[in-house]
Amino acid sequence: MIGRNDPCPCGSGKKYKKCCAGKEELTVEIVQAEELERTLQSFYDEYPKQKDFGDYREFAIQWKLPLSAAYSEEMIEAIALDEFFFHNRTDIWEGFARKQLKKAVRPSVIKVLESWTVPQTLLGQVVKTEESYLTVYDRLNNRTVLLRRESDKPVPEDVHLWCFTLPDGVDGVLAVSTLIFFPVDQSSVFDEFVTAFTNVDQDTETYMKNHSVNLWEQLAENGYKGEEFTDFEQGVLARIASFLEAHARKSDELLELIEDYLVEEQPNARKDVAIAAGAIRYGQEKGLFETLDFTVKAIADEFGVSPSSLNRYYNGITEYTETKMNE
């Protein structure tokens, strides 16, 4: 048991009674994680400085020229900014990290900051999802890492992801940059990219510095445009949205529910309309949008599917939501 006059376990150097006493469920890890997150956010708030913006602008143009037809300008700039910081102008990050280390007070945070070199690329495939971490197979370095989860949104196994990482000071690494997940129908692109990497004599960061833009070009050629979902999953969501719009209805709650259902359950449907029809029945019966008083047959007819197909996915969605509520 911690005494009120003992050093606070959060590592601040203060007595427990002057620091975290009375704050329920506060742990060293939570305090540390919050401070590290603020530190990383301050980096993106402050940089690039005006004196470096010209270099960044020229660098971003090299990414926009080959990618602008496939991706939004916002997405290209986010990717290019991280590549600029962590592969092109590493001196910017190194200077920032030194300043943060001088400013840090908590010993536990100082220890983590001392381990922060230039962020490293993680091009990985999700192996397992747990409450706090994703177990990810780092395909370029042939190892398994624990990546701290950024939200409780479901993440299916086998999807690929990309980000830059730093040690989190606990059990794994945290994403410094934009964390991007790729739908499973892009897996072949990553297989080819990794194969090409194994055939050259370069370390991971040198290879990524020279070829990252090529990876994004290859993804674009394979039909990727920055979406989180497969073409089939997008079809389901688009058909639900189109139905609701056609009947002057709106339900973000239903769409978010079906997004999670598709990701976690990976329903094996032959036609996207069958899942969409089941979703509309579920949404109507659960009051997720203003009722239309459609019968099951009427909904099935709207989507051109049989009532039995509709009911199969209605039941699947119902079982999924009931299971989630009982977890």
Image: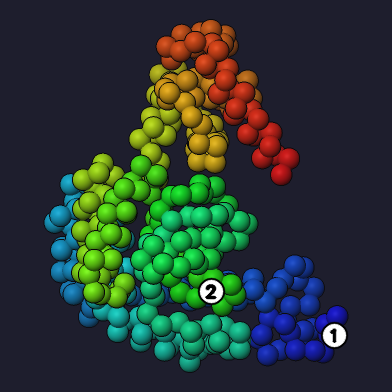
Q: Looking at the picture, tell me which residue is in the foreground, 191 or 129.
A: 191
> Mark 2 falls on what kind of element?
loop
> Which residue is located at x 32 percent, y 53 percent?
191
- Whether label 2 touches label 1, CB < 8 Å: no
Task: Tell us which disc is closer to us: 2 or 1.
Answer: 2
On screen, 138 above or below 90? Answer: above
On screen, 41 above or below 90? Answer: above
> Which residue is located at x 28 percent, y 66 percent?
198
Q: Amino acid at mark 1?
A: Gly
Q: Looking at the picture, tell me which residue is in the foreground, 8 or 135.
A: 135
Q: In which quarter of the view is residue 225 placed?
A: top left
Q: Position of residue 199 (x, y in %)?
A: 24, 66
On screen, 307 above or below 271? Answer: above
**Quadrant in the picture for the C terminus:** top right
Q: Amino acid at mark 2?
A: Asp
Q: Position of residue 67 (x, y in %)?
A: 19, 53
Q: CA distance from mark 2 to mark 1?
A: 28 Å
Q: Residue 3 — which label?
A: 1
Q: Residue 254 — which label?
A: none
Dot 1: few (<14), some (14–19), or many (≥20) neighbours within 10 Å?
few
Left or right: 32 as drawn, with respect to 226: right
Left or right: 29 as drawn, with respect to 76: right
Left or right: 152 as drawn, with respect to 6: left
> Which residue is located at x 85 percent, y 85 percent?
3
- The number of callouts visible is 2
- What residue is shown with label 2? 168
Q: Position of residue 326 (x, y in %)?
A: 73, 40
